[in-house]
Image: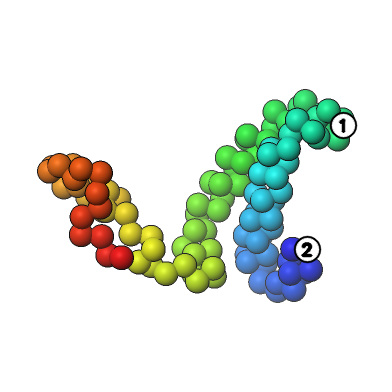
Amino acid sequence: MIETLAKIKNAENRKVFTAVIRLFAVECIRRDLGFYMTEKAISRDAADNTTATLHSLNNFLADNVNGLLVSLNVPAHALYVPIAGDWEKYYSAPNYGEIHGAKL
């Protein structure tokens, strides 16, 4: 990741990719937090700060989600969520837990 990051010339792209790397790292740390704390590699304060760090990174990346989806080649049809378009219409009739009319 660090080698790839060093190759990115555009400052904004580098900033976004850095946030992606940090998000992945914090998630890995949280997954094994008990181990890191037992081994005294992470302090209690740092462990407490992981939630705020995740929220901050997620908020930053949410602002850049369209660019991330394009760069990851996620097809638009894979992102279709009927309730996101018109939730009142979606709930106006029983849907029985099914996605009717999905553009898949």
Quarter of the picture containing the C terminus is bottom left
User: Which amino acid lies under the numbered mark 1 shown in the image of this protein?
Assistant: Glu
Quarter of the picture containing the N terminus is bottom right
- Position of residue 91 relative to residue 46, above or below, is below
Answer whether residue 16 is visible to the viewer in this image. Answer: yes
Q: Which of 27 and 63 is in front in this view?
A: 27
Alpha carbons under labels 2 and 1: distance apart: 26 Å
- Residue 27 picture location, percent across and down: 66, 44
- Please tell me in which quadrant of the rendered image residue 4 appears: bottom right
Seen as rendered, the residue at the extreme left is 93
> Mark 2 or mark 1: which comes first in sequence?
2
Task: Identify the residue at horizontal 25%, vertical 44% (top origin).
Answer: 97
- Position of residue 29 relative to residue 62, above or below, is above
Q: Check contact, mark 2 vs mark 1: CB within 8 A.
A: no
Judged from the image, the secondary structure of the residue bearing numbered disc 1 is loop
The reply, left or right, for residue 59 in relation to residue 103 is right
Task: Identify the residue at horizontal 33%, vertical 59% (top origin).
Answer: 80
**Mark 2 neighbour class, 10 Å CA radius: few under 14, some 14 to 19, many 20 or more:** few
Task: Identify the residue at horizontal 68%, vertical 39% (top origin).
Answer: 31
The reply, left or right, for residue 48 in relation to residue 35 is left
- Residue 87 picture location, percent across and down: 23, 45
The reply, left or right, for residue 40 in relation to residue 52 is right
Q: How many numbered circles are shown?
A: 2
Seen as rendered, the residue at the extreme top is 44
In the picture of the structure, the residue carrying the numbered disc 1 is: 39
In the picture of the structure, the residue carrying the numbered disc 2 is: 2
- Residue 53 picture location, percent across and down: 65, 39
Task: Identify the residue at horizontal 63%, vertical 66% (top origin).
Answer: 13
The coloring applied to the image is: rainbow
Query: Which of the two discs, 2 and 1, sits closer to the camera?
Result: 1
